[in-house]
Image (spheres, rainbow, N blue to C red):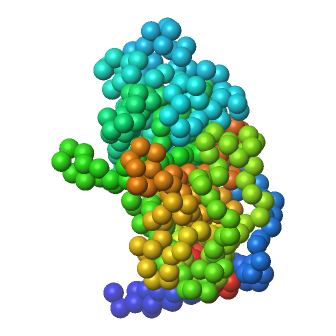
């Protein structure tokens, strides 16, 4: 035993020496990336509106959903089709085209502005199968995703029974397939009705686009199964908290002078028919805000991504977080710093989040059915991923891997210091 001791000590020294080499090498690699980001972020964009630059190809890839989740959506879509007659299937499913993809609305316009088959024309078994498709495709968070869809849809029954007339009903909702649902080809799932629109694009068994999405609600709160529900309160409250965090000077910078009677990027493409986003961002740049204020901007985005399948929601949220410094927020109204209740509480109050990818608008409008009340309209879009770029996107992007995930465990392996906002991103 005594004769082996020197060999053990020598082996330990060699092992420690090897570890030191690995540590030095890793530190050098970390420093290289840090220096790269130092050079890449020496230019900031505070002050006047930012002209939107061309987007690099890597940002046009879509978020990655679990293949098992997509397979479940496809299986339920095929199960729903199996319950239909030949005539019903023809109504449900059409070949994809850019024109049909953009045929959606928030208005109570029935089949005149939507694709697909109407819920009220389905049997109870068929409707259950249709709702199973939607539930599989949506988020599972409380008051988000499928839960929010269910609440908004039932609110239409309240409108119909309080003077709104026959145009408002939970039965006047639609579901459509553009192309054959499959795990190998490209297709789109559309569903919605008054105050709701969803457009989810799939390709090769992956989600390649989860927008445009529209949400609206009237009345803004109501009783459902003995409980008070307010389907868009999480969105409204988070956006109001974001605005209230701004100082008076920052609010002045973020405030828009024009009046908005509604959101601008819906329904269908009401901004002119071509889906063109504004080429100049307005308001205040998020990169100029404090870390606490940035966190509230991110918190305002999260309820929108939470409507989606959890894997897609996580990936898209990470993308939007990484683009936060180059995102702008803007609003209209007379809210005051530190008072969240003073924002988004009156007709024509409006807020926008506009980033390299994310586009969110929230508009307060006079109620259509209940006199003297207000109601909400909101649209969530993605400059890079709307309609899965007409099903052309094929390579899923897990944003964590883009953040130096060298071993594929969906966790960043390097912390990178970005001098533009003095923050470590991991």
Q: Residue at x 39, y 59 (%)?
A: 233
Q: Residue at x 51, y 87 (%)?
A: 16
> Residue 147 vs residue 210: left or right?
left
For this rendering, which residue is in front, 183 or 348? 348
Q: Position of residue 250 (x, y in %)?
A: 61, 83
> Residue 150 vs residue 94: left or right?
left
Vertical arrangement, residue 325 with respect to residue 268, above or below? below
Quadrant holding the N terminus: bottom left
Quadrant holding the C terminus: bottom right
Vertical arrangement, residue 252 with respect to residue 101, above or below? below
Residue that lies at the very extreme toward the left in this rendered image: 226
Locate residue 362: give its quadrant. Answer: bottom right
Q: Residue at x 64, y 75 (%)?
A: 254
> Residue 257 vs residue 51: left or right?
left
Q: Position of residue 306 (x, y in %)?
A: 44, 55
Whether residue 64 is visible: no
Q: Position of residue 326 (x, y in %)?
A: 68, 71
Locate residue 47: give its quadrant. Answer: bottom right
For this rendering, which residue is in front, 322 or 125? 125
For this rendering, which residue is in front, 10 or 72? 72
Residue that lies at the very extreme toward the front in this rendered image: 371
Whether residue 126 is visible: yes
How many badges with numbers are in the image? 0
Locate residue 283: give its quadrant. Answer: bottom right
Q: Residue at x 56, y 20 (%)?
A: 93
Q: Position of residue 82 (x, y in %)?
A: 42, 15
């Amino acid at each position: 035993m005594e004769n082996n001791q020197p060999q053990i000590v020598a082996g330990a020294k060699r092992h420690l020496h090897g570890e030191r080499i690995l540590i030095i090498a890793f530190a050098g690699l970390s420093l290289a990336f840090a220096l790269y980001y130092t050079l890449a972020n020496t230019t900031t964009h505070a002050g006047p509106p930012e002209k939107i630059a061309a987007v690099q190809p890597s940002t046009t890839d879509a978020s990655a959903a679990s293949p098992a989740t997509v397979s479940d959506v496809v299986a339920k879509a095929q199960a729903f089709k199996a319950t239909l007659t030949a005539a019903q299937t023809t109504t449900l499913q059409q070949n994809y085209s850019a024109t049909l993809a953009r045929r959606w609305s928030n208005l109570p316009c029935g089949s005149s502005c939507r694709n697909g088959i109407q819920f009220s024309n389905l049997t109870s078994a068929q409707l259950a199968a249709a709702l199973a498709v939607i539930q599989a495709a949506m988020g599972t968070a409380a008051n988000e995703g499928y839960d929010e869809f269910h609440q908004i849809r039932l609110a239409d029954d309240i409108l119909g029974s309080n003077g709104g007339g026959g145009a408002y009903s939970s039965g006047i909702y639609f579901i459509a397939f553009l192309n054959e649902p499959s795990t190998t080809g490209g297709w789109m799932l559309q569903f919605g009705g008054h105050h709701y629109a969803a457009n989810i694009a799939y390709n090769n068994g992956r989600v390649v686009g989860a927008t445009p999405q529209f949400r609206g609600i009237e009345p803004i709160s109501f009783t459902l199964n003995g409980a008070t529900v307010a389907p868009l309160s999480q969105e409204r409250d988070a956006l109001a908290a974001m605005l209230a965090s701004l100082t008076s000077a920052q609010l002045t910078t973020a405030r828009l002078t024009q009046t908005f009677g509604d959101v601008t990027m819906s329904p269908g493409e009401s901004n002119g028919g071509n889906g063109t986003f504004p080429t100049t961002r307005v308001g205040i740049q998020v990169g100029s805000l404090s870390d606490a204020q940035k966190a509230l901007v991110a918190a305002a985005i999260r309820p929108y991504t939470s409507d989606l399948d959890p894997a897609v929601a996580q990936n898209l949220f990470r993308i939007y977080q990484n683009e936060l410094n180059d995102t702008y927020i803007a609003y209209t109204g007379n809210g005051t710093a530190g008072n969240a209740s003073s924002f988004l509480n009156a007709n024509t109050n409006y807020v926008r989040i506009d980033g390299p990818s994310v586009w969110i608008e929230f508009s307060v409008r006079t109620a259509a059915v209940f006199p003297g009340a207000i109601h909400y309209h909101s649209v969530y879009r993605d400059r890079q991923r709307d309609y899965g770029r007409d099903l052309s996107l094929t390579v899923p992007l897990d944003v964590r891997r883009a953040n130096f995930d060298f071993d594929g465990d969906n966790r960043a392996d390097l912390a990178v210091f970005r001098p533009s906002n003095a923050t470590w991103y991991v």
